[in-house]
Amino acid sequence: MLSNGKAEIVRNNVYKLKVTGIAKLGLPEPKDEPKLATLKLSVEVEPWTIQTNNFEFK
């Protein structure tokens, strides 16, 4: 958790998400036509960081 109270998504981590509730259902058809949007992005995949830890419980 960051100091602003928001969670941080970190690369090369696996996140399992589960929807636990839906507040309100949407409409089967949108009321207005959505405005067109353009998205341009560049993706660079970094190698996975493997954390190896040893534990001993007594």
Image (spheres, rainbow, N blue to C red):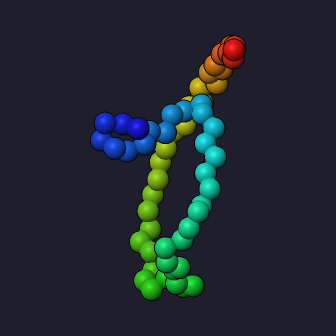
Q: Is residue 5 left or right of residue 45?
A: left
Q: Is residue 47 left or right of residue 8?
A: right
Q: Is residue 14 above or below residue 49?
A: below
Q: Nearer the viewer, residue 57 or 33?
A: 57
Q: Residue at x 59, y 26 (%)?
A: 46
Residue 3's spot in the image, x, y percent?
A: 31, 36
Residue 35's spot in the image, x, y percent?
A: 41, 71
Q: Is residue 54 left or right of residue 4?
A: right
Q: Nearer the viewer, residue 12 or 33?
A: 12
Q: Residue at x 57, y 85 (%)?
A: 28
Pick the quarter of the image with the N terminus. top left
Q: Nearer the viewer, residue 58 or 44?
A: 58
Q: Residue at x 62, y 56 (%)?
A: 18
Q: Is residue 7 above or below residue 24?
A: above
Residue 26's spot in the image, x, y percent?
A: 51, 80
Q: How many marks?
A: 0
Q: Is residue 19 above or below residue 47?
A: below
Toward the front, the furthest residue is 58
Pick the quarter of the image with the C terminus. top right
